[in-house]
Image: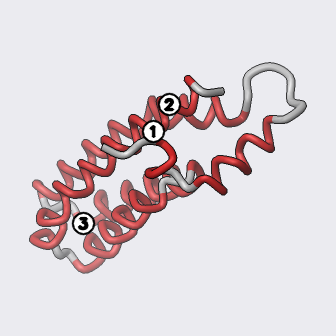
Amino acid sequence: MADAAGTLDPEAVAELRLMDSGSPGTSFLAQLVRLFQTNAPGRMAQIREAITEHHDETLGHVAHTLKSNCSMLGALRMADYCDKFEMMGERRDFAAAAALLPAAEEEFANVAKAVDELLERR
């Protein structure tokens, strides 16, 4: 399993850390991480369910939202998976989405671990 350095774009993380320099109280990075930890697992579950239930609008909408969340944290591979899910939802290509899901879930687990490590190393 990849660590934070291999899963999250170091430049994106550095920019987020830079935004925190000199800010009192809870850091922007910590807020983003906590929002991700709170919301992203449910969004991944919604993607899984949308694929299983063939809900194209839900797949597209939730994948788009998770893509944005991942991009902000520098989880670029996961954002790419979400982009693919979004397009697959638009095309109603549930077979391709189902085939992509295991790799996306593995990457999501890597991202979740890497994001957790961000708070530990602050």
x then y, percent, for residue 53: 11, 55
Q: Can you identify the residue that label 1 sits on? A: 114
x then y, percent, for residue 20: 79, 35
Instruction: Name the residue nearer the viewer: 117 or 39.
Output: 117
Rendered image quadrant of residue 113: top left
> Image height check: is 70 above or below 28?
below
Q: Can you identify the residue that label 2 sits on? A: 117
Dot 2 falls on a residue whose secondary structure is: helix
Mark 1, other Cα within 10 Å: few <14 / some 14–19 / many ≥20: many
What residue is shown at x 45% (from left), y 31% (from top)?
A: 37
Q: Can you identify the residue that label 3 sits on? A: 56
Three-letter residue code for mark 1? Ala
Q: Please state which of the two labelled residues, at mark 2 or mark 3, is closer to the viewer.
A: 2
- Contact between marks 2 and 1 (CB within 8 A): the answer is yes
Rendered image quadrant of residue 58: bottom left
- Contact between marks 1 and 3 (CB within 8 A): the answer is no
Dot 3 falls on a residue whose secondary structure is: helix
